[in-house]
Amino acid sequence: MRPPRFLALGDSLTEGVGDPVGDAWRGWAALLAAGLAPANAPAEFTNLALSGAQTRDLLERQTPAALALCPDVVSVVIGVNDTLRCTFDIHAVAARLDKVYAAFRERDAVLLTACLPDPGSMLGLPGALARPLARRQRAVNTVVHALSERYGAVHLHAAEGDWIADRAMWSADRLHPGERGHRQLALRFHALLAEAGLATGTPPSAEPEFPAPTRSASLWWLATAGTAWVARRCTDLLPQLLTLAAAEVRHKARGTSARLDLSTSHAVSSALAALSTGDQPEAA
């Protein structure tokens, strides 16, 4: 009997950004892989996640590559980059995730999913700028929750908990976990899998293997690579985000902010209803 085969799909979070080992990223998925099976028969691990990936990349590139490798366990953690694009469409996000989840469950793979904190609050943006991003991330999380239940996924509620407010868990860019945060994600996934009898190896340690970066090193990274990372992902969003922020200010002044939340709620309900009836938009 061959060892379990674990494939990780997603974006920079799963790629391991924030948890450097040598000249490469490690991340929560690699830490989890080491604890899926006993040390004498370790799991086979392949990380297909790529920084900047959106649900379109997940559906069109990562999923076909993963299916060809016949995974026993597959993690799909994605969505933040979709919220940072002017093309954000919760109907398309839902349709893509539905197709991806279904494809792996049809192969009897154990599916791991997670909801995520919103990027606006993590970056500490002003309220009028942060709220539209928070609303988008809540929409994605609601879809992920619903589809995870539909497909029987092992789902991690990573959008909540004390770890979000613990600065020691996060890297300098405030968007990606540091080593301690990646270990926390791996530990929480391992606990869920062990409870279901799906992880039989030793859980990863909660304590970092390497010393935390110095403040000066963190600031240097943020001023160079980190700033460039945020800029690349938000450039096409900025004009629209300013428009959304202006709408936030207008609605707040009129006392009608609840309408924005209601509109998002209706969009999410419509997206999920379309999946139930098969009347879904093209997910390309």
Image (cartoon, rainbow, N blue to C red):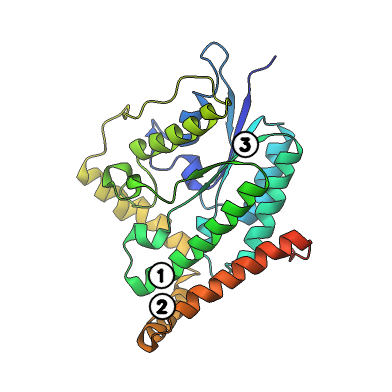
Q: How many angstroms separate mark 1 from mark 3 (CA)?
A: 32 Å
Determine crowd level at label 1: few under 14, some 14-19, many 20+ residues with C-alpha closer than 10 A: many
Q: Nearer the viewer, residue 144 or 245?
A: 144
Q: Nearer the viewer, residue 244 or 51?
A: 244
Q: How many angstroms separate mark 1 from mark 2 (CA)?
A: 8 Å
SS label for mark 3? strand
Q: Earlier in the sequence, mark 1 or mark 2?
A: 1
Find disc 3 in the rendering and name its residue.
74
Q: Is residue 81 left or right of residue 273?
A: left
Q: Is residue 196 above or below residue 220?
A: above
Q: Mark 3 is on which residue type? A: Val
Q: Is residue 110 above or below residue 101?
A: above
Q: Report the number of discs.
A: 3
Q: Is residue 84 visible?
A: no
Q: Mark 1 is on which residue type? A: Arg
- Name the spot of residue 266 as percent of width and height, x first: 59, 72
Q: Which part of the image, by quadrant, shows the C terminus?
A: bottom right
Find disc 1 in the rendering and name its residue.
131
Q: How many angstroms separate mark 2 from mark 3 (CA)?
A: 37 Å
Mark 1 and mark 3 in contact? Answer it, CB < 8 Å. Answer: no
Residue at the image position 38 percent from the left and 68 percent from the top: 130
- Name the spot of residue 70 as percent of width and height, x first: 72, 31
SS label for mark 2? helix
Q: Mark 2 is on which residue type? A: Ala
Q: Nearer the viewer, residue 229 or 271?
A: 271
- Name the spot of residue 67 as percent of width and height, x first: 72, 37
Q: Earlier in the sequence, mark 2 or mark 3?
A: 3
Find disc 2 in the rendering and name its residue.
245
Q: Is residue 17 above or below residue 173?
A: above
Q: Is residue 177 visible?
A: yes
Residue at the image position 43 percent from the left and 43 percent from the top: 17
- Name the spot of residue 278 as percent of width and height, x first: 79, 61
